[in-house]
Amino acid sequence: MFAFSQWNAVSIAARIASAMLLGTVIGLDRSAKRRVAGVKTNAVVCLGSALVMLTAQYITLAYPGESDVTRFGAQVISGVGFLGVGTILVTGHKVRGLTTAASLWTCACIGLAAGAGFLAGAYLATACILVALHLLPKLEAIAFRHSRCLCVLVEFRDGKSLDLFLAHLASRKILVDSMDLYSDRKRDIPVIAELVLKLPGPAGDGRTWVSEFHQVSGVESVEIF
């Protein structure tokens, strides 16, 4: 891989091709999951980042002592954030797109590595990203099933209903780790509570607990978040 750190036509072509390939691989994975940033976005981000590093090295070689190659990469790492922000969506109490934003940022870093000639690191990082996107969610799901914590969003008819709900939790030996209260005037819901609960046993998928909470008097709706 050290041969690709040399400045010649073969090395430049290998860096650009590697960046395009690795960005496409990550993009295909995101597209398969119907994410907003797919093949084109990831491939172009990775390719553009590689071109920035190649341009920085070219300027350094063409104008010795007049350019700092690290400054170009730093601007890419911070500047690609605007793409990530565009993929993050907040709908109600849920935030979506964080993984897509993170993969875009990492894709830019892979492009910088490929553009700098550090192809071994670029390929290894791509493999690690694919592992993280596929294996870690499965481990996370296992951890959630065995966790005793449950986060729920509960809508109440009134303040008295909230008191009844808290009394029900106490009777079931369920601890309230945290609770945020607010209201939704547009939908005429006077009390909404976001609760982090510590259950007496594993939460599982949470559906059993949601069904139970629905039966408490004054509870309009219960949703896991």
Image (tube, rainbow, N blue to C red):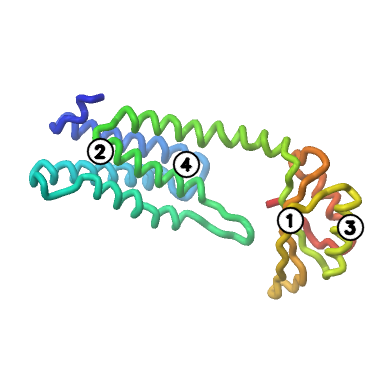
Q: Which residue is depicted at the point 45% across and 35% down? A: 129
In-front residue for pair 71/136: 71
Q: Give the CA separation, mark 3 to mark 2.
A: 61 Å
Q: Is residue 181 left or right of residue 25?
A: right
Q: Give the CA separation, mark 3 to mark 4.
A: 45 Å
The residue indicated by pointer 4 is 30
Q: Which residue is depicted at the point 24% across and 37% down? A: 116
In-front residue for pair 173/145: 173
Task: Tell whether label 3 touches label 1 (CB within 8 Å).
Answer: no
Residue density around tag 4, few if under 14, some if 14–19, many if 20 or more, within 10 Å: many
Q: Residue 167 bears which disc, if any?
A: 3
Of pointers 2 and 4, the one earlier in the residue sequence: 4
> Is label 1 or label 4 in front?
1
In-front residue for pair 31/159: 159
Of pointers 1 and 2, the one earlier in the residue sequence: 2
Of pointers 1 and 4, the one earlier in the residue sequence: 4
Of pointers 1 and 3, the one earlier in the residue sequence: 3
Q: Residue 115 bears which disc, if any?
A: 2
Q: Residue 195 bears which disc, if any?
A: 1
Q: Is residue 149 left or right of residue 214?
A: left
> Is label 2 or label 4 in front?
2
Residue density around tag 2, few if under 14, some if 14–19, many if 20 or more, within 10 Å: many
Q: Position of residue 141 (x, y in %)?
A: 65, 37
Please, what secondary structure does the residue beneath circle 2 have?
Answer: helix
> Is label 1 or label 2 in front?
1
Q: How many marks?
A: 4
